[in-house]
Amino acid sequence: IENLRMENTVLAWLLRGLGLILCGVGILLVLAPIQKLFSWIPILGTLTGGLMTLAAGLLAITLSLITISVAWIAVRPFLAISLLVVAGAAIYLVAKIRRPKQSELPQASPADDAPILLTDDMLVM
């Protein structure tokens, strides 16, 4: 029985790893048109490809952790909640890195809000 349990555990982790890889490949395929758009510029194409691969990997890991933890809630609630916390922390960190701080946002000057007055000589017909 112990041998069958070990085989079941190994098979389950292999299938989870395969699911993670397939999730990453799927996300990378969805992002491929963006990378192809920039591929005609040598340095930018390589940089975009690397960033897309990194983003696909991080997103695949996060989605896989969420999926595995939801499946484990009934069987192993402590481990499931721990995985959900890790996935939530990853999502929070990515959102915090992406969002600019309020002080970095461009500030509109009062002159930008002033109405533009058009005269008859400015109108183009």
Image: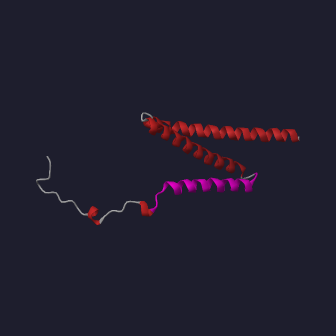
**Farthest residue, direction left:** 121
What percent of the width, then of the height, locates residue 90? 60, 53
Using the image, determine if residue 22 lies above or below residue 105: above
**Farthest residue, direction top:** 40
What percent of the width, then of the height, locates residue 46? 49, 37
User: Which residue corresponds to the image point at 37% horizontal and 60% vertical from the top-left?
Assistant: 106
Whether the magenta-drawn stretch holds residue 92 is answered as: yes
Whether the magenta-drawn stretch holds residue 42 is answered as: no
User: Which residue corresponds to the image point at 58% horizontal and 46% vertical from the top-left?
Assistant: 59
Task: Please tell me how many numbered marks the rendered image carries.
Answer: 0
User: Which residue corresponds to the image point at 64% horizontal and 45% vertical from the top-left?
Assistant: 64
Using the image, determine if residue 34 lies above or below residue 76: above
The quadrant where residue 112 appears: bottom left
The quadrant where residue 105 appears: bottom left
In the picture, measured across the screen, residue 105 lies left or right of residue 61, that is left
Using the image, determine if residue 25 lies above or below residue 78: above
In the picture, measured across the screen, residue 118 lies left or right of residue 86, that is left
Bounds of the magenta span?
75-101
